[in-house]
Image: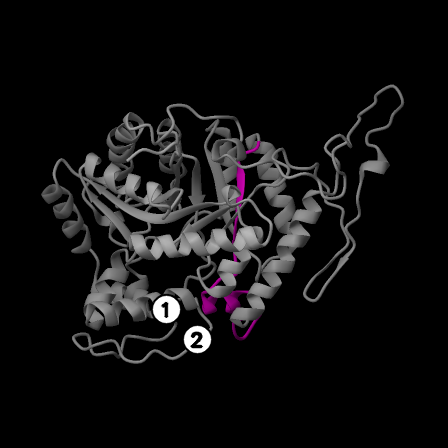
Amino acid sequence: MATSRQLRLGAFMRPVSIHPGAWRYPGAWPDANFNFGHIKRLAQTLERGKFDAFFMADHLAVLNMPTAALKRSHTVTSFEPLTLLPALAVVTERLGLVATASTTFDLPYHIARRFASLDHISGGRAGWNVVTTSNPDSALNFGLEEHVEHGERYHRAREFIDVVTGLWDSWADDAFVRDVASGVYFDPAKLHVLDHKGEHLSVRGPLNIARPIQGWPVIVQAGASESGRQLAAETAEVVFASQRRLDEAQRFYADVKGRMVKLGRDPDHLKILPGCFVIVGDSLDEAQAKKARLEDLVHYDTSIASLSIALGTDASGFDPDGPLPEIPDSNASKSSRDRLVERAKRDHLTVRQLAKQVGGFGGLEMIGTPKMIADQMEEWLVGNASDGFNIMFPFLPAGLDEFVDRVVPELQRRGLFRHEYEGATLRENLGLPRPPNQFFPAR
């Protein structure tokens, strides 16, 4: 298969592995989620492997599952993303740094200021993963008795993004003249006051930080619902997708990029990266044995709690060995729930079988030798199912080391992945343009 395109690779970190059994795997670091020395080493390994970005997922609630499951979770404690990533910026040089931040439970001025700061500190490597926060338990930590309705969250998010990007454009790129002789620090004609008053938000501005090095930090989004797809088509530059099958991914890819064209956006200015759980072995049997060992470390209490979160309803009372019952509509993630319901029906899964998939990792998996994994990645790239992948590691540090030392060279040998970074900024490495300032057009 011949292609001139190259894979873009992100690393999904929470801030380490998403798999609930990862911390128990032989040789893994049990405390890695809250050990800066370990995370620093992982980020530097990603940079050695020429990854585009370290993507830090986040959650805003701890008490989101029964204690029987919660006590087994290694993600109950982790660093706040926009505290951790500036520290990683100091110990890396080219690796992109993408943080999750909620449009439902934060304010635009905070978000604009923090990401502008990260972009300057990192030399232009920041990215903002825009989330509306699907977990209803999060609302209880922010003065609300119940979660904001799904559609309302997306309407607020759309306005929120406009406000944040408007704040990033508060200053022209050359606003700060710093003329020592005259004593003039900035040119007032190159300062814009946003003065936004909308349906959900009121923000005067301007931002008290110079325009980010990238113009705007890269806008990332992950929603797969109708609202999420439209938001991505309108605003996103990277989408972290969740399709498991090639045909599903091709339909999603065509849909989102087709919406972009209708909106007048260049589809090449959006990179679609499905989450991909990768286990490397000397043979398929060895890789599958690693997976089986990892899955055996996940307790049923954890699996059924994870299924409950994904479905937006308590599944603990379901018959473990019966079919999935009818699932009522909820205010949680609609796309996640719908995918699971469809999968259970299609594959005739019992509740226990479905819970085991979700309790481990229920998305796209590539398991096998470096050649087998590279074959699948190439098929997805050439088949217009993705522009790359957001890699999820089964356990750390070994899972990451095996990918960097074995899979990356195979991808490079095929001409599918870089040998060196293209530039200094995340935008340059992803092949994304620097957005013009909407208030100070280039002359």
Which residue occupies the foreground of this view, 161 or 415?
415
| Secondary element type, mark 1 | helix
Crowding near pointer 2: few (<14 within 10 Å), some, many (20+)?
A: some
Quarter holding the N terminus?
A: top left
Q: Which mark is residue 190?
A: none
How many badges with numbers are in the image? Answer: 2
Q: Residue at x 71, y 40 (%)?
A: 437
Q: Are marks 2 and 1 in contact (CB under 8 Å)?
A: yes
Horizontal side of 277 relative to 7 (left or right) equals: left
> Mark 2 — residue?
330
The spot of residue 27 in percent (x, y) is 21, 39
For the view shown, which residue lies furthest in the left direction? 285
Look at the image and tell me whether residue 399 can be seen.
Answer: yes
Dot label at residue 337 = 1
Query: Measuring 84% from the left and 33% from the top, which residue is drawn there?
Result: 187
Task: Please state which amino acid type lies under the numbered disc 1.
Answer: Arg
Seen as rendered, the residue at the extreme top is 181
Where 132 falls versus 425 (above or below)?
A: below
Compare marks 2 and 1 and give the one earlier in the sequence: 2
Report how far apart the C-alphas of labels 2 and 1 lie in the structure: 9 Å
Q: Quadrant of residue 266?
A: top right
Region of the chain picked out in magenta, as a range: 124-147
